[in-house]
Image: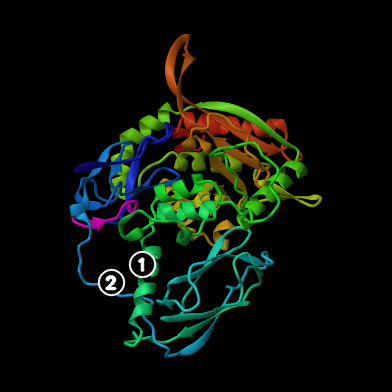
Amino acid sequence: MTIDIKVPVLPESVADASIATWHVAVGDKVSRDQSLVDIETDKVVLEVVAPADGVVSEILFAQGDTVLGEQVIAKFESGASAAKTSSAPAPSKADTSNKKGEAVEIKVPVLPESVADATIATWHVKPGEAISRDQNLVDIETDKVVLEVVAPADGMLSEILAEEGATVNGEQVIAHFTAGTLPAASGAPAKAESAAPAAEENDALSPSVRRLLAEKGLDATKIKGTGKGGRVTKEDVEKFLQAPAPSTAKAGSAAPVPALALGNRTEKRVPMTRLRKTIATRLLESKNSTAMLTTFNEVNMKPIMDLRKQYQDSFEKRHGIRLGFMSFYVKAVTEALKRFPEVNASIDGDDICYHNYFDISIAVSTPRGLVTPILRDCDALGMAGIESGIRDLALKGRDGKLTMEDMQGGNFTITNGGVFGSLLSTPIINLPQSAILGMHKIQDRPMAVNGKVEILPMMYLALSYDHRIIDGKESVGFLVTIKEMLEDPTRLLLDV
């Protein structure tokens, strides 16, 4: 059966998207829930997965092409006939002998001075497993980013010293690793064969399934897979979550007190991740330690939308990247910061620190939570440079590759809840900054223009600011400056 592979539905504030990366080619046999393509919008990267086992029969748009919501981008042939038919058994990474190589200590990476310790988030391997060079061994979570520790060579993990959830310090030894070539043992085929499916199953989990397992804190080995070769699918995970918890009552024990029948209404308690705890602490600290106030305005987005439509193709052809809304927001904010230095300042004790540079924090939603990586020296960047920088940060955020350098600093934050459909919000200041700008959903509304009613694409702006350092005059003037520049983009070029 032929299935159309479509672009996901895009939020109203996102006009179009672009094909970022095809992970498959025409003729490739793919498994259900396997990632087919990454589609990039102004702020986030969307993943499109295979609807079933099958073969990619046709790709209609190449990498870099601009596409619209629900547009057909590929053809897919599903069915059992498309399943992999290789008769040769897959080589097992677990086929190892007892030959031992060089012993290596696996250590926590060096932590920045501002980070006191870290937490072991997830071990991706177990002692005794055969490992390839550069394979991810463990995720180590700090207050801001997740660090990956990879295998220094081909070999085997011999011992884990710090289990998941343990607090560790920089350069602390957390495991022992045996490096060296480990050829297959001819005398123990049964053990190798039994280990092969588990290794293959872990490798076969799709990104969406791995993400769901991580969010719910589940172990894939405890879930019965119904996919090809016993692979766990998203439906298997959802059924597992809906299943009632097994009874733990022991024979001969006292009868429990009757409880209200809840049916499928179950609860699950999981500890906060280190990043989520840090986000909660910082947000609460911001609310309690600043005199935060929010002022609002609205902007007519039609001039920018018309400008993008007119120059989108030539801009992309010249610079190799789409012209999005965020570059206009960043440019307008940078110019407004130049005119209102109080907004580009921060409080340090009893002093006010005025910054003569323009590093903008861009709020990015990741599977582990909201983070704010920094786009540096925005006053020196053109529209293409801004778009490229934002795309790189979004991709690194999605893949968990943001570094401490990406996260440290920043004078002002832009957050765009409009990509998720938010019409209006009061964003919380990102300490130690003094203000944050919230962008929202672009929505057609009737507006009075020269005594007549016109339907215009309008967007609400929200500026939350610390009233200890920024007065009402500066906050309103700052927001009005952004509004004027967005409604007349020529001002960005003429600096008026």
**Kind of residue at disc 2:** Ala
Looking at the image, which residue is at 55% across and 62% down? 146
Give residue 90's mark. 2
Please indicate whether residue 233 sits to the left or right of residue 431 in the image.
Answer: left
Q: Secondary structure at mark 1?
A: helix
Which residue is label 1 attached to?
200
- The span shown in magenta is 25-36
Q: Are marks 1 and 2 in contact (CB under 8 Å)?
A: yes
**Kind of residue at disc 1:** Glu
Please indicate whether residue 90 sits to the left or right of residue 258 in the image.
Answer: left
The relative height of residue 103 versus residue 495 in the rendered view (above or below) is below
Give residue 276's mark. none
**Splitting the image into 4 quarters, where does residue 154 fall?**
bottom left
The relative height of residue 292 versus residue 180 in the rendered view (above or below) is above
Residue 278, visible in the rendered structure: yes
Residue 377 location, x and y as percent?
53, 53
Please indicate whether residue 195 sits to the left or right of residue 55 in the image.
Answer: right
Q: Residue furthest right?
A: 350
Mark 1 crowdedness (10 Å alpha carbons): few <14, some 14-19, many ≥20: some
Residue 29 location, x and y as percent?
23, 57
Q: Does 30 lie within the magenta span?
A: yes
Q: Secondary structure at mark 2?
A: loop
Q: Earlier in the sequence, mark 1 or mark 2?
A: 2
Residue 452 location, x and y as percent?
45, 9
Q: Does 391 lie within the magenta span?
A: no
